[in-house]
Image (cartoon, rainbow, N blue to C red):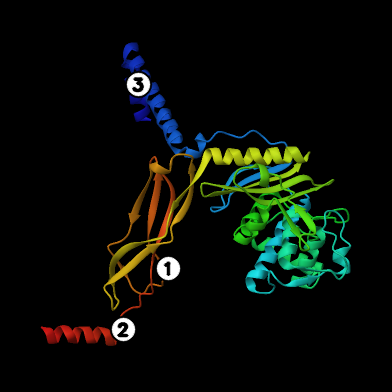
Amino acid sequence: MKILSRLSDFYYRLDRKKLWIIWTANILWIVLLFSYIWCLDSYAATWEDNIPTLSPLDCKSAVLMEAETGRILYEQNADESLPPASVTKVMTLLLTMEAIEKGNITLDQMLTASDHAASMGGTQVFLEVGEQMSVEDLLKSVIIASANDAAVVLAEAIAGSEESFVSMMNNRASELGMQNTHFENTNGLDDTVTDHVTSARDISLMSRELIRHEKILEYSSIWMDTVRNGEFGLTNTNRLVRFYKGATGLKTGSTSKAKFCISATAKRDGMHLIAVIMGAPTRDIRNAEATKLLDWGFANYSLYKYDPCSLGEVKLLGSNTSMLECKTDGISLLVPKGTSGKITSEINLPESVKAPLSAGEQVGNIVFKLDGEEIGKAKIVSSRDANPISFAELFFIMLQKFILW
């Protein structure tokens, strides 16, 4: 109470001029404080704030992903579960390519069309019951012409039945983190299904995984081809393959339920983009919106790559060798177009490391910055195993030094 009384006394004795000076100083201090906080907020803004925004697209949902980093550059209603039509076949193709990689089937293997496969409606290559076609021609029929019957033949050869293959599709979707997906068939026909859905984000995830198989891009980038020894023509349902610079694929789809969908891939200057459009009202709008997404991505982003390399040696303690070679597996970073030359890197390595260490174990890092802002880190790892020195080895070294001394 005495303190309050003294303060009150002090202010009372001040004349108005002095009081005005004190209040002005307080107000200025508050203004300066808020200005400082505002500056901190401004400094926290990232370089992506300078990327021009893209207006909403004429479709139910959309995603633009950069394939190597997996970064989502644009999304619109990305997680709504929607019917995907023949974009379903991205998963069918992925499982087929993985079966080929494992050696379960081969490209030149001949497969036979079953009654069930031959009964498929919609887009097809009109396989007859008992007709044989190579895995490679079936793949081309699926990815170029979106053949429903060919998709079922591949599924039955890999899993024994379409039902078993669909179970594989759902399991693989779960592994890839496709949280809004449930498949009921291999091809996307949706007249009789009740819950055959996926999302734009999930399509980008399975598309990214599929294009890791470079062989698939050989087929998906073909405009026209033939099967049955040249007797049956295939024309790509993805018109961007013919008309968009750098287009590499990937898969279109359309039904009355799904409207018009596409997972469109294109590569320029080492950057591979995946543009997903779901539920566009027409084919032309679908293609135009996919083009708009890809154009926006290529216009505003580029891929900065720091390649794998050796980074010299560091002192190794507690081992029978004195030095350890270090390396980095490199990194890929998305940056604004035209800024790659401004990126700086800082290698952080300790003066020494201690055994034991396993090959690939992290011992340091490389920090990458753009205009002073950290944009990524690459691990620096041990290039080999570094085992601790044994008692026998230590004794032998000490004995050598004693003898030499």
Type of residue at label 3?
Ala
Q: Considering only vertical position in the picture, is 379 above or below 101?
A: above
Point out the image quarter for the C terminus.
bottom left
Q: Considering only vertical position in the picture, is 39 above or below 70?
A: above
**Viewer-proximal residue among 189 and 149:** 149
Crowd tier of the residue under label 3, counting other residues whose Cα lies within 10 Å: few below 14, some 14–19, many 20 or above: few
Q: Determine whether the residue tagged by mark 1 lies in a helix, strand or loop.
A: loop
Number of callouts: 3
Residue that label 2 marks:
390
Name the residue rendered at 39%, 40% in the picture: 371
Type of residue at label 1?
Gly
Residue that label 3 marks:
25
How far is the residue under mark 2 from the one under mark 3? 71 Å
Residue that label 1 marks:
360
Q: Position of residue 4 (x, y in %)?
A: 37, 27
**Viewer-proximal residue among 400 and 102:** 102
Name the residue rendered at 42%, 68% in the picture: 360
Q: Is residue 42 left or right of residue 117?
A: left
Q: Determine whether the residue tagged by mark 2 lies in a helix, strand or loop.
A: loop
Q: Position of residue 10 (x, y in %)?
A: 32, 21
Which residue is outermost to the front? 230
Q: Position of residue 175 (x, y in %)?
A: 65, 63
* Image quadrant where residue 331 sits: bottom left
Type of residue at label 2?
Ser
Point out the image quarter for the N terminus.
top left
